[in-house]
Image (tube, grey):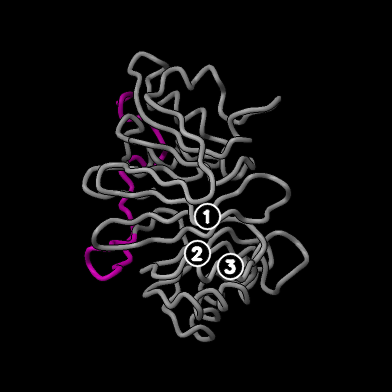
């Protein structure tokens, strides 16, 4: 979730995204837009559920969706056409496209190589900060240019060492952070070998080898750009995931 001056953008709502939002006290009706970087299940499983919650089953239409063409068309779109009619806007993202949401500008930085599906890395920015979201994909040297100038960088790190698969590793994260030189690196999307290694240890490895402060993404953690990238734990308002409407 990217939030700035009352604008909320939910990025890649995978399995359990609705429940996690409710646990954190986020009312789905107050989410302004949803963005998919690509159509894979771990990034899109809850998109229809969240649209349903956002629009109250169509009784309160609104909101926007930004997604690649293959998430919206073809024989098996991941965003149901049934739900799209309840949205204010559905936009197709592609390389170098950009959109404004409140005070946030959303830009597609580049197309990633990722298992044959349309996949786009993103940049969120306003007058004060620039956040790069380097989603799933094989490391490409072009990433250094595409994401330059970012204050913080979120990087897919599925493996410990590079593999001949369309996912990045801790070594790739080191290369990216050394080249981009942000103030903060955030690693996420961990495979089992990194989970066994330990998230804190993995982040320490990247930080020590890149020279950039690095943290692992964890559930219910917020990073405040306005206070020097302060990392804080979100206090759960509905720990069991019960809807506040049911109280």
Q: Calculate the distance from the C-alpha at mark 3 to the C-alpha at mark 2.
A: 6 Å
Q: Residue at x 36, y 69 (%)?
A: 151
- Magenta residues span 223-247
Tell me residue 153's x, y (percent).
Answer: 44, 66
Q: Name the residue beneath numbered marker 1.
A: 121
**Could you tell me which secondary element the residue under label 1 belongs to?**
strand
CB contact under 8 Å: marks 2 and 1: yes
**What residue does disc 3 label?**
142
Nearer the observer, 13 or 168: 168
Pointer 2: residues within 10 angstroms few (<14), some, or many (20+)? many
- Quadrant of the snapshot with the C terminus: top left
Give the foreground label among 1 and 3: 3
158 and 21: which is toward the camera: 158
The residue at the point 46 percent across, 75 percent down is: 180
> Mark 3 touching mark 2, by CB under 8 A?
yes
In the depicted view, which residue is nearer to us: 228 or 239? 228
The mark nearer the N terminus, 2 or 1, is 1
Q: Which of marks 1 and 3 is nearer the N terminus?
A: 1
At horizontal 63% and vertical 73% (from top left) the residue drawn is 197
Residues under labels 1 and 3: Cα distance? 12 Å
Frontmost residue, 177 versus 120: 120
**What secondary structure is marked by label 2?**
helix
Q: Where is residue 121 in the image (x, y as percent from the top left)?
A: 52, 55
Is 247 left, or right, of 79 in this rendering? left
Q: Does the magenta stretch include residue 241?
A: yes
State which quadrant residue 74 falls in: top right
- Residue that badge 2 annotates: 146
């Amino acid at each position: 979730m990217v939030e700035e001056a009352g604008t909320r953008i939910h990025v890649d709502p995978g399995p359990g995204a609705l429940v996690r939002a409710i646990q954190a006290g986020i009312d789905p009706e107050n989410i302004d837009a949803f963005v998919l970087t690509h159509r894979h299940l771990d990034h899109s499983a809850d998109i229809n559920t969240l649209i349903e919650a956002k629009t109250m089953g169509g009784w309160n239409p609104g909101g926007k969706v930004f997604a690649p063409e293959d998430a919206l068309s073809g024989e098996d779109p991941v965003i149901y056409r049934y739900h799209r009619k309840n949205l204010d806007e559905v936009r197709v993202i592609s390389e170098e496209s950009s959109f404004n949401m409140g005070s946030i500008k959303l830009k597609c930085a580049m197309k990633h190589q990722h298992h044959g599906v349309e996949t786009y890395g993103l940049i969120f920015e306003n007058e004060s900060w620039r956040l790069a979201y380097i989603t799933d994909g094989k490391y490409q040297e072009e990433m250094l240019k595409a994401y330059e100038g970012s204050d913080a960088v979120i990087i897919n790190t599925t493996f410990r060492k590079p593999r001949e698969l369309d996912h990045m590793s801790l070594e790739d994260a080191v290369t990216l952070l050394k080249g981009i030189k942000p103030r903060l690196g955030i690693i996420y999307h961990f495979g089992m070998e990194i989970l066994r290694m330990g998230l804190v240890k993995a982040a320490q490895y990247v930080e020590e080898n890149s020279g950039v402060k690095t943290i692992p993404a964890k559930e219910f953690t917020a990073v405040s750009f306005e206070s020097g990238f302060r990392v804080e734990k979100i206090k759960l308002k509905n720990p069991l995931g019960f809807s506040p409407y049911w109280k």
